[in-house]
Image (cartoon, rainbow, N blue to C red):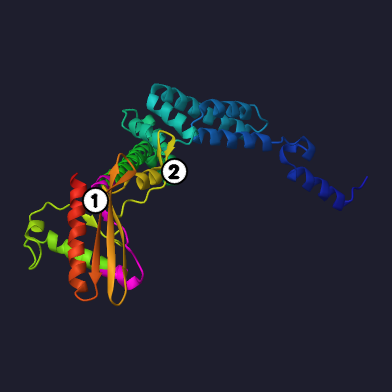
Amino acid sequence: MRLHPIPLLFLLANWLLAPSGLSAAEEPDSGVQQLQLEIAALYERLNDWEQAEKQLLAAAGGPSAELRERALEDLERVRQHAERSAESPNLELAWFYERRRLWREAEKHYLAAAAETSEEVRRIALEGLERVRPQMPLTGLAEDLEPIEPRVEFVTALLAKGLAVVAFLAVGFILVSAARGVIRARRQIEVLPFVANSSEGSAQIDYWLGRTRARCRAPQPFPGGPAAMSRMAFPYLRLPGLADHLPELDEVTLAGTKLPAGELLRKTKLPRVRVTGGWVFNESNGRVFAEFERRKGISRYEPVATIEREIPAKGQEHELELFAYDVLIQAARANAS
């Protein structure tokens, strides 16, 4: 029988090109085996020798002879690393911290392992440093700030206590100032606005009282002023329009209790002597009077004296000045009584 040359050539080429004489369906599937080797290499880079050994043992039982040989070589290397790492506690701790992404601690133990005598341990430690240090800038700032946090908390607590002390001292200063103002006000003589039949008449009384007070408080007596007045220890005389300014207080909270401090100040800052009066005048003459009241107890007043004087139109200024001296003398007597 004679064979056709074309089919014969086709069969010969197919036999020569077929690998190992196996068909495509009979070829070993080495993809899983290759994947196991890659996973083992990953675990080896992470220094997880146990997991790397498991993957290499699985790859050593695969279908590809070449990959099996490679897996056995890697397995021997991994076991050597595991044995050496067991001899170096620093490496064990470094891998422990590295797997938990604690880069600063891992670096510290890798550096300690790099100073050991074993060449293999030093090599593994240097490889670990190459892996760890690129990760450190990402978390280095947070790790550097960790020791500072307790200090920040301490400083914050200290500032809070300092502010509390400052607030306490400020409240104490205000209360002390208010108390001093009350004491000063309770020693004073207060002249209330005189009632007059015109604003000009009220202004005249205020002027002469102020001028007379200035003469009495001067180091040397004014010409024409009574000599006895210059030698008197005259108390402070508060004229109309000269309010005694005290700290503005509304309510003060002490130990959870609200105290009406403002109301207490208004009820207690009462002068020792209070002077009231009136002044009526026309073109020909006028009449002026003053009443003196002295405080009894905390807020009660009782009258102690009254003075009255005729003010003729002629020589009115002189008469008003004499009346102002009378007011100051009688106020001083009421204050001393």
Rendering coords of residue 137 (x, y %): 42, 46
Numbered range of the magenta stretch: 182-204
Q: Secondary structure at mark 1?
A: loop
Q: Which residue is mark 1?
A: 188
Q: As displayed, is residue 109 above or below residue 155? A: above
Q: Which mark is residue 139?
A: 2
Residue at 31 percent of width and 45 percent of height: 302
Q: Secondary structure at mark 2?
A: helix
Given contact means CB atoms under 8 Å apart, are the residues at marks 1 and 2 in contact?
no
**Amino acid type, label 1:** Gln
| Viewer-side residue, 195 vs 37 | 195
Query: Upstream in the sequence, badge 1 or badge 2?
Result: 2
Rendering coords of residue 126 (x, y %): 38, 37
User: Which mark lies nearer to you, 1 or 2?
Assistant: 1
Rendering coords of residue 138 (x, y %): 45, 46
Res 55 → quadrant:
top right
The local crowd at label 1, few if under 14, some if 14 to 19, many if 20 or more residues have their Cα within 10 Å, is some
| Viewer-side residue, 84 vs 276 | 276
Residue at 11 percent of width and 57 percent of height: 229
| Viewer-side residue, 112 vs 284 | 284
Q: Is residue 136 visible?
A: no
**Amino acid type, label 2:** Thr
Q: As displayed, is residue 94 above or below residue 278? A: above
Q: Which mark is residue 114?
A: none
Rendering coords of residue 187 (x, y %): 23, 47
200 inside magenta stretch: yes
Residue 133 left/right relative to 200: right
Q: Is residue 22 visible?
A: yes
Residue 69 left/right relative to 272: right
85 inside magenta stretch: no
- Image quadrant containing the N terminus: top right
